[in-house]
Amino acid sequence: MAKSKVKVEGNTISGTAEAIMDVMQKATDRLQAKEEIKPYEITHASIKEEECNYGYEIKTGKTAGDKIPTRKGEAIVHNDMINAFDALRVHLAVSDDAFKHIYTELPELDELKEHEVVEAFYIAGFKVQGVDEDEGYLLSGHKWVTLGSMGINTPKITKNNYKFFDDLKEQMDLARFEVEEYMNGKHRVDVDEEENQPELPFGGTSASEFEEEE
């Protein structure tokens, strides 16, 4: 059966109800997709001495595609950003095989999040590599060992090599959002909030700051 066509003459649309609804839905989808395009996208970030250093790519306008590799924040990070980074600790622990000698087979992520092993890990930063289906993440941080602390930088984590990628992506989206909020002025500003600010281990110093490769 041939598809019914929609005819547009001036302000008048004619055709079957089904065809008109289909055209309207496609137009709505295109508008929503256009609205969802952000003017910039965070590509990497790290917390150092309670300040955030980050980079981003411009996504719209005449300079779309331009990368701002390093922007050093001067303001103290909000506790929401610290909490968003902390939510990535379990993924750093899994990537470091921290549970390898505890479980013969990894349990659900909720159980791993509650394990005391995670407390030995600290997230200092992240970097995004690839786009769409090829998008993956590199995490940077520290872990406590018998002699003190040591830095960790993961390889690229993707949906093809990591069991808990869906949760990682969700937490990464939140971390990137908090960096965007920091960029737009969300900082620690008042005394009450300072009293409730989570303490950063290692003096809030990153193992290594991610910077965009030229």
Image (cartoon, helix red, strand yellow):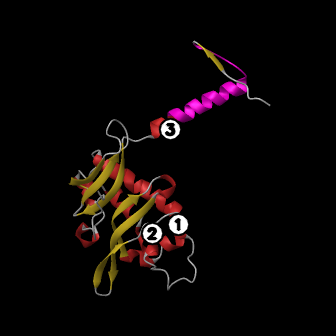
Q: Secondary structure at mark 2?
A: helix
Q: Secondary structure at mark 3?
A: helix
Give the CA separation, mark 3 to mark 2.
30 Å
Q: Earlier in the sequence, mark 3 or mark 2?
A: 3
Residue sitting at 52 percent across and 63 percent down? 159
Q: Residue furthest left?
A: 74
Start and end of the magenta stretch? 11-31
| Residue 98 point in image, percent of width and height | 45, 80
Q: Locate residue 78 relative to residue 135 in the image: left or right.
A: left
Q: Crowding at label 2, few (<14), some or many (≥20) Cα neighbours within 10 Å?
A: many
Q: Which residue is mark 3?
A: 33
Q: Residue furthest top?
A: 10
| Residue 143 point in image, percent of width and height | 34, 77
Q: Locate residue 204 relative to residue 157 in the image: left or right.
A: left
Q: Which residue is mark 2?
A: 91
Do labels 3 and 2 touch, CB within 8 Å?
Answer: no
Q: Which residue is mark 1?
A: 164
Q: Secondary structure at mark 1?
A: loop
